[in-house]
Amino acid sequence: MPKIEIKSISGKVLYSSEALGLRECLKNAVKDMADLSGAYLSGAYLRGADLRGADLGGAYLSGAYLSGAYLSGAYLSGADLRGADLSGAYLSGADLRGADLSGAYLSGADLGGADLSGADLSGAYLRGDIKIQKQPIPIDAIKYHVTIWDNHIQIGCEFHSIADWFSFDKRRITSMDGPTALKWWEKWKKPLKNICKAEGRT
């Protein structure tokens, strides 16, 4: 079995192991709790990789293919994720503070509880052709995590335009998650509407 190395941009070896490829080597590195800060992984094919809890602070992941990857709880503060494909990736609870996600593809990504403070999301694709221009507003509300985007709100797994959310009747809200959803919505509808209005989100 070949020895695979993970290097920094300067060529310093951060981790090495016998593995069939980079994805398996990364899996081993995460298992060994290796410090992969500053790892050079630009353009890497990491579809479905399990990187939960990985330390990838400041890593170079621009153009990387991370579709469906598990990055829950990963440390990605300051990481370069420009143009990365993160569609369907699990990023719940990930630390993305100051990360560069400009032009990244986030369609279907789970960002619940992710720390996006200071992250550059300009031009990132949220879903399909929906581009992000403004900093998202994350709200940790009991029961459901909320993210307010430019013109959309994601509450739990439900993603709709802001206009749609505030036009839904009780029956539509109940269809999402039963009486629990309706009770939650009745409590949070007005505060969320006020936040959207104050932040110029429509």
Image: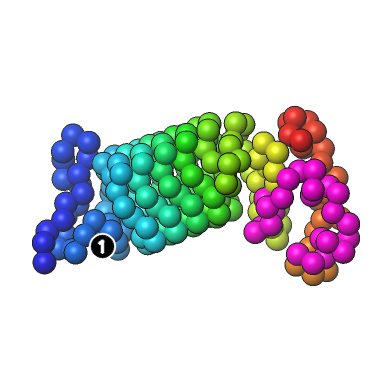
Query: Looking at the picture, how far across and down is residue 49, in whole percent?
Result: 36, 60
Q: Residue furthest bottom?
A: 178
Q: Which one is in front, 120 or 15?
A: 120
Q: Which one is in front, 168 or 37?
A: 168
Q: Is residue 195 above or below residue 156?
A: above
Q: Secondary structure at mark 1?
A: helix
Residue behind mark 1: 24
In the image, 2: left or right of 180? left
In the image, 52: left or right of 201? left
Q: Which residues are magenta?
A: 154-176
Residue under the point 37% across and 50% down: 65
Query: Looking at the picture, how far across and down is residue 109, in whole percent?
Result: 53, 53
Q: Is residue 116 magenta?
A: no
Quadrant location, the N terminus: bottom left
Mark 1 surroundings within 10 Å by alpha-carbon count, few (fewer than 14), some (14 through 19), many (20 or more): some
Q: Is residue 191 visible?
A: no
